[in-house]
Amino acid sequence: MKDCLFCKVQEANYKKEIVKENDHFFATRDSFPVTELHTLIIPKRHIQSYFEMNQDEINSINQILNQQRNEILSLDENITAFNIGINDGKDAGQSIHHLHVHLIPRRKGDMENPQGGVRGVIPAKQKYVKRN
């Protein structure tokens, strides 16, 4: 789609932003990173949802996620963990309607208590507290 930001990244004059690619996906560093080396994994085909991927794309996304994880680990020895996330749909917070997977490197002490991880998308639900 001509107005899609992530489709435009694949054009020749934006190719410099791509740090790795395979047949179905490319990786680029996030323009508004949560942590240093926050990376986006983006399909070359314009699709909005994770659930629109075909089997070849599912296999391919796993390959590039693992490759990027290993590369990021080699760039920063302080990384101890990762969050992997997808905002799938407007009500889940998706702001660019082209599927993209966030690979967010984490470091010990980067927040006081990371327990609950991605549950923090709804802050009151991040901590495991029994509610009546």
Image (spheres, grey):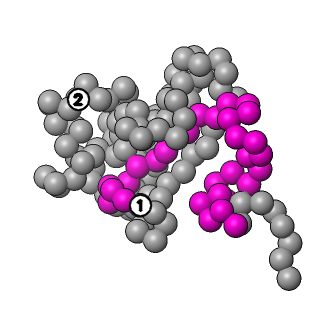
* Res 84 label: none
Can you say which quadrant of the picture contains the C terminus? bottom right
Residue found farthest to the bottom: 132
Residue 1 position in % (x across, y down):
17, 55
Callout 2, which amino acid? Lys
Q: Look at the picture and state if 124 lies above or below 32.
A: below
Please give the range of residues in magenta.
Answer: 95-124
Task: Name the residue that disc number 2 marks.
Answer: 15
Task: Answer whether residue 27 is visible to the viewer in this image.
Answer: no
What's the residue at 77%, 50% (across, down)? 115
Q: Judge from the rendering whether residue 40 lies leftward or rightward of residue 130; answer left or right.
A: left
Label 2 crowd bin: few (<14), some (14–19), many (20+), radius 10 Å = few
Label 1 crowd bin: few (<14), some (14–19), many (20+), radius 10 Å = some
Task: Name the residue that disc number 1 marks.
Answer: 94
Query: Would residue 93 be counted in the magenta stretch?
Result: no
What's the residue at 59%, 34% (across, down)? 105
Q: In what element is the residue under mark 2?
A: helix
What's the residue at 49%, 66% (across, down)? 92
> Who is closer to the viewer here, 26 or 121?
121
What's the residue at 62%, 65% (across, down)? 122
Callout 1, which amino acid? Gln
Task: Answer whether residue 77 is visible to the viewer in this image.
Answer: yes
Q: Judge from the rendering whether residue 104 lies leftward or rightward of residue 33; answer left or right.
A: right
Residue 6 position in % (x across, y down):
27, 46
Residues under labels 1 and 2: Cα distance?
Answer: 23 Å
Residue found farthest to the front: 112
Q: Earlier in the sequence, mark 1 or mark 2?
A: 2
Residue 2 position in % (x across, y down):
13, 52
